[in-house]
Image (cartoon, rainbow, N blue to C red):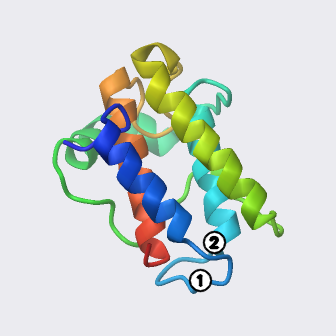
């Protein structure tokens, strides 16, 4: 399964990230490209423990079941998957600054290995192993790059 601890998967994502343009139209959702980059950075910050949002009620009820469905296969995340409120980006972030920040966070996560992963539970899925964080972050980045055709 592709994940952010595998160099070929990381390089592929970074190539796709480089192809993204600020004015690229979205194929679904509400975010523009700069907001999506900032949102992805926030997700990686959560995976590394820099952000520690609380668990949500629905996640406490069904998160474990959905985790197996979401992370247990090669299927990409579905279009219009709900966005965690703590990671919603408003305003107009600077596209190039956000791309550089995201590239740096991808590098930090991928080279840091399992030791950089948070032990704080994911807000919806609950506790994740480093491998699960790595798969989730790959799928999340892939999802938003596909959102803009990259």
| Quadrant in the rendering for residue 149 | bottom left
- Kindly identify which numbered label has been placed on residue 33: 2
- Kindly identify which numbered label has been placed on residue 119: none
Which residue occupies the foreground of this view, 38 or 89? 38
Which residue occupies the foreground of this view, 93 or 14? 14
- Kindly identify which numbered label has been placed on residue 24: 1
Does label 1 or label 2 sit earlier along the sequence? Answer: 1
How many labels sit on residues?
Answer: 2
| Quadrant in the rendering for residue 91 | bottom right
Q: Is residue 118 above or below residue 37?
A: above
Which element type, helix, strand or loop, lies under badge 2?
Answer: helix
Left/right of residue 29 with respect to residue 146 in the rendered view: right
| Quadrant in the rendering for residue 125 | top left
Left/right of residue 82 with respect to residue 35 in the rendered view: left
Residue at horizontal 51 percent and vertical 19 percent from the top: 116
Q: Is residue 80 visible?
A: no
Which element type, helix, strand or loop, lies under badge 1?
Answer: loop
Residue at horizontal 59 percent and vertical 46 percent from the top: 103
* CA distance separating discs 1 and 2: 7 Å
Q: Is residue 26 above or below residue 6?
A: below
* Mark 1 and mark 2 residues within 8 Å of each other at the beta carbon: yes
Residue at horizontal 16 percent and vertical 47 percent from the top: 73
Residue 29 lies, in percent from the top left, at 53, 77
Residue at horizontal 39 percent and vertical 58 percent from the top: 142
Mark 1 Cα within 10 Å, few/some/many (few <14, many 20+)? some
Residue 122 lies, in percent from the top left, at 48, 32
Residue 130 lies, in percent from the top left, at 37, 22
Mark 2 Cα within 10 Å, few/some/many (few <14, many 20+)? many
Question: In which quadrant is the C terminus drawn?
Answer: bottom left
Question: In which quadrant is the N terminus drawn?
Answer: top left
């Amino acid at each position: 399964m592709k994940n952010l601890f595998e160099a070929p998967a990381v390089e592929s994502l970074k190539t796709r990230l480089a192809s993204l343009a600020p004015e690229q139209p979205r194929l679904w959702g509400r975010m523009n490209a700069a907001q999506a980059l900032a949102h992805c950075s926030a997700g990686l910050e959560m995976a590394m423990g820099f952000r520690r949002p609380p668990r949500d009620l629905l996640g406490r009820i069904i998160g474990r079941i959905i985790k197996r469905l979401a992370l247990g296969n090669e299927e990409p995340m579905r279009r219009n998957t709900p966005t965690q409120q703590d990671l919603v980006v408003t305003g107009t972030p600077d596209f190039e600054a956000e791309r550089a920040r995201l590239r740096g966070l991808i590098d930090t996560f991928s080279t840091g290995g399992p030791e950089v992963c948070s032990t704080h539970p994911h807000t919806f899925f609950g506790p994740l192993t480093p491998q699960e964080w790595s798969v989730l972050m790959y799928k999340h980045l892939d999802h938003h790059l596909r959102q803009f055709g990259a």
